[in-house]
Every structure is written in C-alpha cells, then in structure tokens.
Image: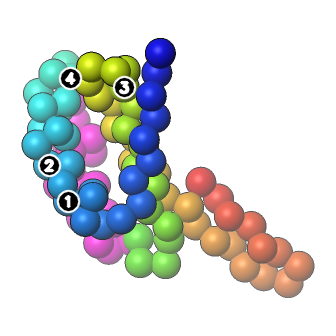
Amino acid sequence: MSIIVEIQSLDEFKNLKSLWGTLSQQTPNASFFQSLIWTQNYWRHFGRENLLKIMLIGDRQRVLGIVPLCVRKIDGPGLGLRVL
C-alpha cells in the first residue's frame, strides 16, 4: 500500500536533507535539477508568493520518492485560480 505525506512548512523542508541525499544517490542519472540544493534555491528566489507542497511517497518501510510542488495563485477580474 502506498503512503503519501504532504509537507508545507519550510522547517520540515529543511529536515529532508538526509532523506533527499539518500534518494539522490539511489537514482541513476540524477540531474542537478532533482537536487535539494536546486529546489531550496528555486524556492528561496521564486516561492515567496506561492504555497509550498512537497509530497513524500512511499510504502510502510521507506520513502520511495519526493515530489516538490508549489501552488500559485492567479488573481484577476473574475479570477481566483490556484495552479499546482
């Protein structure tokens, strides 16, 4: 059975360093754009007005993947959209 855990706080995000590093080492041909450093820098520069959503996906024994996402609000006349 798959388990999905959602992380929205920056403190929890920072605590993923060890887990993210372990998964990165287990990923053949992992790129820089999948790294925690790139994700943290991206968030620092572009995430201020967005909502952080990091999904941890796994089973009962271990985390199998991390999916960094953000929710962006789009405001305008008659609009109140949130885009993932």
Mark linked to residue 58: 3
Q: CA distance from mark 2 to mark 4?
A: 15 Å
Badge 4 density bin: few <14, some 14–19, many ≥20, Cα 10 Å: few
Type of amino acid under label 3: Gly
The structure residue drawn at horizontal position 44% and vertical position 48%, both measured from the top left corner, is: 6
The structure residue drawn at horizontal position 47% and vertical position 15%, both measured from the top left corner, is: 1
* Picture quadrant of residue 47: bottom left
Whichever of callouts 4 and 3 sits on the residue coming sooner in the sequence is 4
Type of amino acid under label 4: Thr
The image's colour scheme reads rainbow
Circles 1 and 2 in contact, beta carbons < 8 Å: yes
The residue under label 1 is 14
Circles 4 and 3 in contact, beta carbons < 8 Å: no
Q: Is residue 80 left or right of residue 4?
A: right
Secondary structure, mark 2, is helix
* Picture quadrant of residue 41: bottom left
The residue under label 2 is 17
Whichever of callouts 2 and 4 sits on the residue coming sooner in the sequence is 2
Q: Is residue 7 left or right of residue 63?
A: right
Secondary structure, mark 4, is loop
Q: Nearer the viewer, residue 60 or 31?
A: 60
The residue under label 4 is 27
Extreme residue in the front direction:
60
Extreme residue in the bottom direction:
77
Give the residues in magenta.
Answer: 30-46
Q: CA distance from mark 1 to mark 2?
A: 6 Å
Q: CA distance from mark 3 to mark 1?
A: 19 Å
Task: Say whether residue 53 is magenta.
Answer: no
Quadrant assignment for the C terminus: bottom right
Whichever of callouts 1 and 4 sits on the residue coming sooner in the sequence is 1
Task: Say whether residue 36 is magenta.
Answer: yes
Q: Nearer the viewer, mark 4 or mark 3?
A: 3
